[in-house]
Every structure is written in structure tokens, then in C-alpha cells.
């Protein structure tokens, strides 16, 4: 074998995702897994039934159309109109992907050239760094700092260079729970227009903004032509294993992203696409109940973590709480998370792995609350014994 490393140098250092490591630790120690963000209760039974029916009646069992089945593209367009007043043509402005993850990868591979810079909030969802790297581009972090985690938009302006190609936005934001406010979005949009930048926005937690609502940046002046909006069914309908996502954007952007997407998976999840088309048309009460339920769970976990001595940053959205472990006399989130299962049978995620600025993330630890109340209560009781 040659001495050359097997792994492409663009991927060097990316290693195993923290979720794989921590979920394996949860299994091997029998711990409560508040690490990875997947619900422990499946989504609506009638939507599961729709997926089963699609399989049994032969809908989507063979390769569905490359851009996604027309029923789902139509349902996505209706959803964007219903919740945000956005008008997308289901034939040319909607693309179905294998979860938001593929949409992010396809967008980065399609829109970036080696040498381009991508400004992204850090801490970032881990696939951003990997996808930017796979595209040969450079990530430029805008660090969100405790306790507010609000972005410093003067700093954003200063980070823009002639090499900046796109802004990668995520709201509601994983892991901090930040939800961008209207004036912040307006300023980001203004900078994008002024510097002629593309914006890729990851909105998978769009229905989990607990106060003030979710505002898509694509709706702002000058943004329709330069924004790739990404979302998916996993979080909104509690079927994270189905991996059905979508892109909405102007035709030229959808066409570019589709070019990359067709050589990643070509198509995916045929029968699930039918079921997600139904899910997107669920009445408002479904979305309201989901949000109210998770808000209640947020408060349950936040109170429990506070009582256990953590510094708690109450999230405005998502189903994650970021905490500070320094009040517990701890300094290093990675060490803390690796030892937590043995110490008290709970798994959490160290935020430091989502930062380039490791000092900013070192004492921060993320817990998810998309679990049954009894599980959250037991986790809190265990953490209070720390
Ligand atoms: C911010 C963010 N984007 C994307 C994803 C992945 O979405 P999907 O499962 O649809 O690929 C996640 C999952 O945790 C996420 O937190």
C-alpha cells in the first residue's frame, strides 16, 4: 500500500460523527439518550398508515421521478404558501431530496467552487463543515456566543470578502435554540443583496419556534432569486428515519442543486414521499399541538437541568437545550459527556464539536427534549444525583 492516506484530504479530521459515538455509548451503557435529536414516539398514525398503504399498493416502490413525486412537490408548494405566503411553482421551484442532509450536500456541491468562502454560524450542524469541505470550499465561522447566542451582524459584515460565495443560515438554530428575529434576517438579507451573495437556509425546525414564529429569509426583498431554502419531514412529523426533505428556490437554483442531487441518490424514499405529501396537509392543529407539546417538554427539562445545577440557556426554538457545565465545577464538555453515562446513565452532546473556536464551545453541553415525559423526568432525576 502506498503511504498516501486513504481518506481524501478534504475529509481529514472529520472522523466519526459525535452522534454515532454518543449513541453507541448510550446503547453500550444502557443510558438515557438525550444526545441525538430523534423522538422516542413516532409521528401521526394516519401518516404511518399512508406510507404502509403506498408500499402495499405499489406507489413509489420503483424509482420515483428525479425531482420528487408531483403530489409531494405540490404539497410543499402549498405548505410554503399556507404558512409563509411564499409562492413556488411545484414543477420548477421545488426539489425533493433524501432528507435535509442531502439537500445541504447537493447545494454545497452545486454552488461552490474550490476557494469559495462560506460564512456559517458556529456552532454549526456537523454536516455543514463536511459538505463545505467536500465541495473544496472554506468555512468562515461567525461565532454565536453565550449567553444570548445572538449573531453579531457587524462581525458578519466584516467577515465578507470578495471570495465569499454564500451565507449558510440555520433558524431555528441547532444546537443553541436561537431563532433569528425579523430585524436580524433583514440585515442578513441586506448584506446578501449588497454583496451579491447566495443564501442557503436550513429550516428543518421551522415548526418549532416557540415564540415570535419562524420567518423565512426567502420572503424578504431581493432574496427570492438568491436563496435556497431547505426543510424536511423528520423533525416536523417525527419520522426522522424516513429521510424526506425538500428544497424551494428559483428555477436556476433548483436546477443547479438538482444537477448535484441526481448523482448523489438520484431518488429516494418513494412510498414515504406519498405519506409526507399527506402530512404537509395536516390541519393547523397538528402543527400547533406539536409546538405546544415540545414547549412544555422544553420547560420540564430546563427546570430539571437548572435544579441539577447546570447553567441553562432557554431555547426559543428547536428541541435542544444548550447548558453551561461550569456551575457544576466542570470545564470540558467533551470529557463531561464521555464520562456522564458511567456517572449517571445519561447521554448528552458536547457543543465543542460544532465549533472552530473551541474555547467558545468548551463548557457547553446539549440535551434534547424530544422524549417522553417519563424519560425526561428520569433523566433529570439522574442528573440531579450528579
Ligand atoms: C440543523 C439540522 N439540519 C439538518 C438536519 C438533518 O435533517 P434530515 O434528517 O432531514 O436529513 C438536522 C438533524 O438533526 C439538523 O439538526
Image (tube, grey):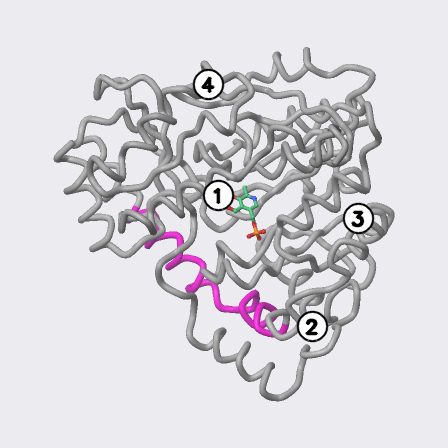
> Residue at horizontal 54%, vertical 19%?
143
- The residue beneath circle 4 is 145
Density class for disc 2 (Cα within 10 Å; few <14, some 14-19, many ≥20) is some
Disc nearest the viewer among 2 and 3? 3
* Residue 296 seen from this side: no
Badge 4 residue CB within 8 Å of ligand 1: no
Q: Nearer the viewer, residue 83 or 49?
A: 49
Point out residue 120 in the picture as x, y percentages from the top left corner: 63, 27
The residues tagged by marks 3 and 4 sit, at their Cα atoms, a distance apart of 32 Å
Whether pointer 2 and pointer 1 mark residues with C-beta atoms closer than 8 Å, the reply is no
Give above or below for 198 relative to 244. above
What is the span of residues highlighted in magenta in the rendered image?
274-297
- The residue beneath circle 3 is 257
Secondary structure beneath label 1: loop
Whether pointer 1 and pointer 3 mark residues with C-beta atoms closer than 8 Å, the reply is no
Residue 70 on the magenta segment: no
Whether pointer 2 and pointer 3 mark residues with C-beta atoms closer than 8 Å, the reply is no
Amino acid at each position: 500500500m502506498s503511504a498516501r492516506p486513504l481518506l481524501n484530504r478534504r475529509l481529514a479530521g472529520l472522523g466519526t460523527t459525535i452522534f454515532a459515538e454518543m449513541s453507541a455509548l448510550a446503547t453500550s451503557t444502557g443510558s438515557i439518550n438525550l444526545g441525538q435529536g430523534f423522538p422516542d414516539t413516532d409521528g401521526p398514525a394516519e401518516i404511518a398508515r399512508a406510507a404502509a398503504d403506498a408500499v402495499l399498493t405499489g406507489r413509489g416502490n420503483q424509482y420515483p421521478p428525479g425531482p420528487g413525486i408531483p403530489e409531494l412537490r405540490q404539497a410543499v408548494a402549498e405548505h410554503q404558501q399556507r404558512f409563509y405566503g411564499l409562492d413556488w411553482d411545484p414543477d420548477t421551484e421545488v426539489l425533493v431530496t433524501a432528507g435535509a442532509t442531502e439537500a445541504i450536500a447537493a447545494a454545497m456541491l452545486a454552488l461552490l467552487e474550490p476557494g469559495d468562502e462560506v460564512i456559517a454560524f458556529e456552532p454549526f450542524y456537523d454536516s455543514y463543515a463536511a459538505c463545505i469541505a467536500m465541495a473544496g470550499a472554506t468555512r468562515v465561522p461567525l461565532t454565536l456566543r453565550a449567553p444570548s447566542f445572538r449573531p453579531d451582524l457587524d462581525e458578519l459584515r466584516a467577515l465578507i470578502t470578495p471570495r465569499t460565495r454564500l451565507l449558510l443560515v440555520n433558524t431555528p438554530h441547532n444546537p443553541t435554540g436561537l431563532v433569528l428575529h425579523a430585524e436580524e434576517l433583514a440585515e442578513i438579507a441586506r448584506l446578501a443583496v449588497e454583496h451579491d451573495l447566495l443564501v442557503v437556509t436550513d429550516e428543518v425546525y421551522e415548526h418549532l419556534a416557540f415564540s415570535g414564529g419562524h420567518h423565512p429569509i426567502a420572503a424578504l426583498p431581493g432574496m427570492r432569486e438568491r436563496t435556497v431554502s431547505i426543510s424536511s419531514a423528520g423533525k416536523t412529523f417525527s419520522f426522522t428515519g424516513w429521510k424526506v426533505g425538500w428544497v424551494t428556490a428559483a428555477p436556476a437554483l433548483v436546477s443547479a442543486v438538482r444537477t448535484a442531487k441526481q448523482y448523489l441518490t438520484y431518488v429516494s424514499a418513494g412510498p414515504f414521499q406519498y405519506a409526507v405529501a399527506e402530512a404537509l396537509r395536516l390541519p393547523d392543529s397538528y402543527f400547533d399541538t406539536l409546538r405546544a407539546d415540545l414547549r412544555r417538554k422544553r420547560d420540564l427539562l430546563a427546570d430539571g437541568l437548572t435544579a441539577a445545577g447546570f447553567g441553562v440557556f432557554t431555547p426559543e426554538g428547536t428541541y435542544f437545550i444548550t447548558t453551561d457545565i461550569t456551575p457544576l465545577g466542570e470545564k470540558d464538555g467533551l470529557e463531561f459527556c464521555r464520562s456522564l453515562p458511567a456517572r449517571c446513565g445519561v447521554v448528552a452532546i458536547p457543543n465543542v464539536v460544532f465549533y472552530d473556536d473551541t474555547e467558545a464551545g468548551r463548557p457547553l453541553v446539549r440535551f434534547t427534549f424530544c422524549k417522553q415525559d417519563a424519560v425526561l423526568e428520569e433523566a433529570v432525576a439522574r442528573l440531579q444525583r450528579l
